C-alpha cells in the first residue's frame, strides 16, 4: 500500500509550530522573525517525514507549475539528435523546472495527444523539436502557452532555434582554403530535392548557400559536384568511387554530412588513396563516430546541446519573435592536410 502523502500540517505539528510559520520557513521567506531553533526544527521535521511540496497546489496559487514539455518526433529515441534534449533538460533543471518528454514518432494523432497532455498539466512552456531540421506542421489546437520551435519552424509559432547552417557552410570551405586549397575541390552530396522538394530541410539550403557563396567570393570553382539523395555511407562510397576513377582526381572533398564522408573513406582506402596525404575531407554534423575514424574526420558540428539550452532560455526570458541561429563550430581533426601547392 502507498503511504499517505506528508502534508505541511504534519511538518508543522512535529516541529511544534503553526502551519503558517512552517510554510514561511520552508518557502525561504525573509524576515520571518522566527528563531534559528524554529528554522532548524522545521527543516529537521521535513527531512524526517520526507515532506515534499505539493507542486500542483502551488501552481494553482502562482499560475506556474515549473514544468516544461518537450514534444518531438523521434529526438528522444534517436542517437543522432539526443543532444537537443540533453541541452533542454540541463537548462530546465538549472532553472528549477521539470521537463516532460513526449515522443510522437511524427504521427499526427500522437502529436495531438501529446499537446493535449502537456496543456492538461498546465506546463509553463512547450518546446517542439524535430530530429532533422524542417518545417513542422502541428495540429490546429489552440495553444496560449509559450512555444519555441527547436531545430524546426512553424508559421504559427515564430520563435525558432536553428543551427547557423549558412555560417557552417562558409566555415567548411575556409577549412580547405586556409589549408591552401585553391583548386581540385569536389562537392559531395548536394541535392536539389533536399533543398527545394516537398520534404526539404529547413536548413540544408542554407548550408549549400554558405558553401557556394564562399567559393564565389574567393573566385573558386568546384572541380565536380555529385548529387546524392540519401546521405548514407553507401551513397558516399559509390559516389567517391566514381570520383576517384576520373582522369583528374579531386584533391579535397566537401561532404554534405559525416555519413557520406564515412563512405568516402572506404572508397579512398580501396583505391589506395591516402587521407589526408592524397585527399583531404571536411564534412558536417560531428557524428560521434567521426572521432573514431583513422584519421579522425574534420567536421562542422551541429550544436545540438547549445540549441536545446537556448530553446528553454527563450521560454524563460522571451525575446522578439524570429529565428535564433546557433553557431556551428569546426571540430578540427586529421582529415585535412595543408597543400604543398
Image: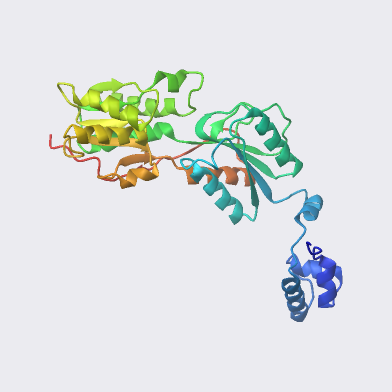
The answer to whether residue 321 is seen in the rendering is: yes
Residue 220 appears in the picture as rendered: no
Q: Is residue 248 shown left or right of residue 216? A: left
Q: Which of 256/220 is in front?
A: 256
**247 w.r.t. 149: above or below:** above
Q: In the shown orientation, is residue 26 left or right of residue 129? A: right
Determine the image quadrant of residue 130. Answer: top right
Task: Give the image's coloring scheme.
Answer: rainbow
- Picture coordinates of residue 309, whole percent (x, y): 54, 47
The image position of residue 270, as x and y in percent, is 20, 33
The residue closer to the viewer here, 184 or 51, is 51
Coordinates of residue 103 in the picture (x, y in percent): 61, 39
Quadrant assignment for the C terminus: top left
**200 shown above or below 88:** above
Nearer the observer, 76 or 332: 76
Q: Classify residue 276 by image quadrant.
A: top left
**Residue at the farthest front position:** 1
Work out which residue is located at the far bottom of the displayed protein and give it: 37
Is residue 89 shown left or right of residue 207? right
Q: Quadrant of the N terminus?
A: bottom right
For image coordinates 52% across by 43% down, the residue present is 84
For the image, the number of numbered tags is: 0
Which residue occupies 18% across, 31% down?
Answer: 271
* Whole-percent x, y for residue 265 in the image: 26, 36
Q: Nearer the viewer, residue 341 or 72?
A: 72
Q: Residue at x 13, y 37 (%)?
A: 340
| Residue at figure coordinates x 76%, y 81% from the top left | 37
Amino acid at each position: 500500500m502507498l503511504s499517505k502523502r506528508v502534508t505541511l500540517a504534519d511538518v508543522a505539528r512535529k516541529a511544534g509550530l503553526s502551519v503558517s510559520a512552517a510554510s514561511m520557513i520552508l518557502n525561504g521567506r525573509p524576515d520571518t522573525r522566527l528563531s534559528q531553533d524554529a528554522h532548524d526544527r522545521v527543516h529537521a521535521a521535513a527531512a524526517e517525514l520526507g515532506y515534499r511540496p505539493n507542486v500542483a497546489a502551488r501552481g494553482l496559487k502562482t499560475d506556474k507549475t515549473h514544468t516544461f514539455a518537450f514534444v518531438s518526433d523521434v529526438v528522444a529515441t534517436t542517437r543522432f539528435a539526443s543532444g537537443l534534449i540533453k541541452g533542454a533538460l540541463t537548462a530546465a533543471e538549472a532553472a528549477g523546472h521539470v521537463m516532460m518528454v513526449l515522443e510522437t514518432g511524427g504521427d499526427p494523432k500522437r502529436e495531438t495527444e501529446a499537446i493535449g497532455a502537456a496543456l492538461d498539466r498546465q506546463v509553463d512552456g512547450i518546446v517542439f523539436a524535430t530530429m532533422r531540421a524542417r518545417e513542422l506542421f502541428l495540429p490546429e489546437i489552440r495553444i496560449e502557452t509559450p512555444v519555441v520551435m527547436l531545430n524546426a519552424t512553424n508559421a504559427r509559432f515564430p520563435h525558432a532555434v536553428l543551427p547557423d547552417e549558412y555560417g557552417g557552410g562558409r566555415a567548411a570551405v575556409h577549412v580547405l582554403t586556409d589549408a591552401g586549397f585553391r583548386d581540385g575541390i569536389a562537392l559531395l552530396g548536394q541535392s536539389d530535392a533536399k533543398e527545394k522538394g516537398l520534404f526539404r530541410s529547413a536548413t540544408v539550403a542554407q548550408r549549400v548557400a554558405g558553401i557556394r557563396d564562399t567559393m564565389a567570393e574567393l573566385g573558386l570553382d568546384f572541380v565536380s559536384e555529385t548529387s546524392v539523395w540519401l546521405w548514407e555511407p553507401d551513397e558516399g562510397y559509390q559516389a567517391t568511387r566514381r570520383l576517384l576513377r576520373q582522369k583528374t582526381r579531386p584533391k579535397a572533398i566537401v561532404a554534405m554530412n559525416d555519413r557520406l564522408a564515412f563512405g568516402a573513406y572506404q572508397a579512398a582506402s580501396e583505391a589506395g588513396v591516402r587521407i589526408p596525404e592524397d585527399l583531404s575531407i571536411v564534412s558536417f554534423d560531428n557524428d560521434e563516430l567521426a572521432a573514431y575514424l583513422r584519421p579522425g574526420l574534420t567536421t562542422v558540428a551541429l550544436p545540438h546541446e547549445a540549441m536545446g539550452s537556448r530553446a528553454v532560455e527563450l521560454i524563460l526570458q522571451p525575446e522578439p519573435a524570429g529565428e535564433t541561429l546557433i553557431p556551428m563550430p569546426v571540430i578540427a581533426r586529421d582529415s585535412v592536410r595543408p597543400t604543398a601547392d
